[in-house]
Image (spheres, grey):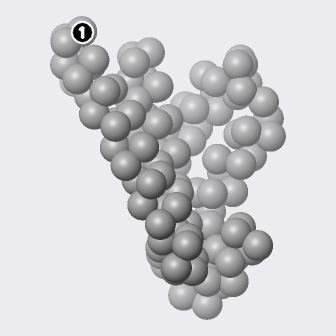
Amino acid sequence: MILSDEERKAIVEYRIEKAFTVLNDAEKITAIKLWSSAANRLYYSLYYAATALLISDGHVSHTHSGMITLFGQNYVSKGPLSKEDGKLMKRIFDLRQEADYDDFRGLLHACSLFA
């Protein structure tokens, strides 16, 4: 799908706004110790911010794993982000996966993120 400059700008702005909204949700959820939900919201905050950056540069991913791959290829391997930043993105993705789909392991690992 080819986007006009105006469409791309609107999507990027929306995703950035959504990233901050969801990050605020994560902070509130963390305060009441709902760890699995906090891991989910934290990941989605990163997801919306990362997809905004990718879209702004003309990259599109159709899966979460694809987004992580594109993000790593374009912003970690080539800079400006560090390998540690890329590892953190992957770790938070894994925590969200576990929190959402692996009931027992997800809870334990989500708690470790906020400990």
Whether residue 102 appears in this view of the structure is: no
- Relative to 15, residue 77 above or below: above
Q: Residue at x 62, y 67 (%)?
A: 95
Q: Please give the count of numbered marks on the rendered protein.
A: 1
Q: Residues within 10 Å of mark 1 (few under 14, many from 20)?
A: few
Looking at the image, residue 69 sits to the left or right of residue 57; the answer is: right
In front: 4, or 25?
A: 25
- Relative to 20, residue 7 above or below: above
| Residue under numbered circle 1 | 5
Image quarter hosting the C terminus: bottom right
Whether residue 106 appears in this view of the structure is: yes
In front: 30, or 8?
A: 30
Q: For the residue marked with disc 1, what is the amino acid?
A: Asp
- Relative to 57, residue 61 above or below: below
In percent of width and height, residue 35 lies at 57, 77
In percent of width and height, residue 101 lies at 49, 78
Snapshot quadrant of residue 97: bottom right
Q: Residue at x 24, y 9 (%)?
A: 5
Instruction: Specify the farthest residue to the bottom.
Output: 104
Looking at the image, residue 94 sits to the left or right of residue 45; the answer is: right
Q: Residue at x 79, y 35 (%)?
A: 83
Looking at the image, residue 35 sits to the left or right of residue 108; the answer is: left
Of helix, strand and loop, which one carries label 1?
Answer: helix
Image quarter hosting the N terminus: top left
In percent of width and height, residue 70 lies at 55, 31
In percent of width and height, residue 53 lies at 47, 25
